[in-house]
């Protein structure tokens, strides 16, 4: 058997590569620094190498040659080949922080971004481990590019049906994506046009929610307003209309199928920085009056022992303005008093 199990590792004889025209002997020694040698050659005993450390194009040629020889390809779904996918899989771990970060996106996109994140986390851990191992062996110079290529070969062997991701599998395209992820974190995996795809026109109801959030005393940024808006749509918090004091109903912000209609952070930011909207927000009260109110007194010229300043009930009337308007349309003031 050409490819065999060597102490739990998929292995093969090195000389088989040039004897079967897969690569020249000189080419093998040029790539030997990237190939793991499980057993060095000796008189009458050929060298044994680890199949998984071969370059990706060489492994493909090996599989094609094995098919011609009517042997099972080393990358086929056989019992022996389960060693290779499991090797990269052991580095794949859940990432709760990524799950929370992508929760604001639609489910399909959130799953895609999350899978890409945990795959790159595993890629980073495996790359760091291999660089450390090679440095510990006393190598004077560790070429990180060569280690990167070996880890990429492991990623290419991962079962994408089980771990569905959309990462590129070429060195040229994956390398900048990986470094961008290290630099910018989870945001690097979000498609640049995502905000445009999910950007929607701010409706009148959404405007009232954004204004009610924007007038908070902490002088919030657009990022905080957007986060609170998403939490409101998910049912985590309630938001009070700053004008009427009535709770917003999240069902008014869903489509016909009952799915919450999210807006992007850039849409919220553009709305809040609009001069016309800023002027409207500036006229709104800073926050709810809570349970303690400060009301200025006012004189009364008449003879009444139970007077009160008009501002005392102004807030109550304004908060019930919508209900009173509805009553005025159908009832007389005397009927309103009776009710």
Image (cartoon, rainbow, N blue to C red):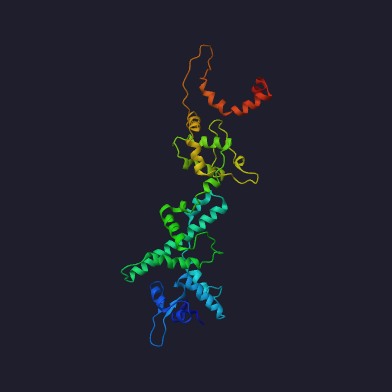
Task: Tell me residue 330's x, y (percent).
Answer: 69, 25
Residue at (47% x, 43% y) in the render: 223
Q: Position of residue 84 (x, y in %)?
A: 49, 71
Where residue 174 appears, as percent x and y from the top left, is: 46, 60
Q: Name the residue at 48% across, 15% down.
A: 299
219 and 147: which is toward the camera: 147
Q: Is residue 324 above or below residue 61?
A: above
Q: Is residue 189 visible?
A: yes
Q: Quadrant of residue 148?
A: bottom left
Reply above or below: 294 against 84. Answer: above
The C terminus is located in which quarter?
Answer: top right
Residue 71: tell me if it is visible. no
- Quick check: 328 left or right of 129? right
In the image shown, does 331 or 119 lie closer to the viewer? Answer: 119
Residue 218 or residue 311, whichever sits in front: 218
- Residue 318: quadrant of the picture: top right
Task: Report the label total.
Answer: 0
């Amino acid at each position: 058997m050409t490819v065999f199990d060597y102490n739990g590792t998929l292995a093969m004889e090195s000389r088989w590569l040039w004897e079967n025209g897969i690569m020249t002997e000189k080419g093998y020694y040029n790539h030997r620094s990237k190939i793991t040698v499980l057993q060095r050659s000796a008189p009458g005993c050929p060298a044994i190498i680890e199949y998984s450390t071969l370059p990706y194009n060489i492994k493909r040629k090996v599989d094609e040659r094995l098919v011609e020889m009517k042997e099972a390809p080393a990358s086929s779904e056989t019992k022996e080949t389960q060693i290779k996918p499991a090797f990269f899989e052991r580095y794949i771990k859940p990432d709760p922080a990524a799950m929370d970060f992508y929760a604001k996106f639609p489910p399909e996109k959130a799953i895609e971004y999350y899978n890409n994140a945990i795959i790159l986390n595993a890629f980073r851990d495996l790359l760091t481990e291999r660089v450390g191992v090679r440095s510990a062996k006393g190598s004077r110079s560790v070429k990180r590019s060569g280690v990167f290529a070996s880890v990429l070969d492991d990623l290419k062997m991962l079962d994408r049906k089980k771990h569905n991701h959309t990462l590129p599998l070429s060195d040229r395209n994956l390398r900048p994506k990986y470094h961008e992820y290290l630099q910018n974190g989870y945001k690097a995996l979000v498609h640049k046009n995502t905000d445009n795809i999910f950007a929607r026109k701010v409706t009148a109801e959404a405007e009232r929610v954004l204004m009610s959030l924007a007038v908070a005393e902490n002088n919030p940024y657009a990022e905080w307003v957007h986060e609170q808006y998403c939490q409101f749509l998910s049912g985590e918090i309630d938001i009070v209309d700053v004008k009427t004091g009535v709770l917003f109903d999240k069902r008014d912000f869903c489509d016909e199928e009952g799915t919450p209609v999210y807006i992007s952070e850039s849409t919220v930011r553009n709305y809040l920085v609009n001069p016309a909207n800023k002027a409207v927000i500036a006229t709104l009260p800073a926050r709810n009056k809570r349970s303690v109110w400060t009301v200025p007194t006012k004189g009364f010229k008449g003879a009444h022992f139970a007077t009160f300043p008009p501002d005392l009930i102004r807030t109550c009337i304004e908060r019930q303005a919508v209900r009173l308007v509805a009553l005025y349309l159908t009832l007389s003031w005397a009927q309103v008093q009776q009710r």
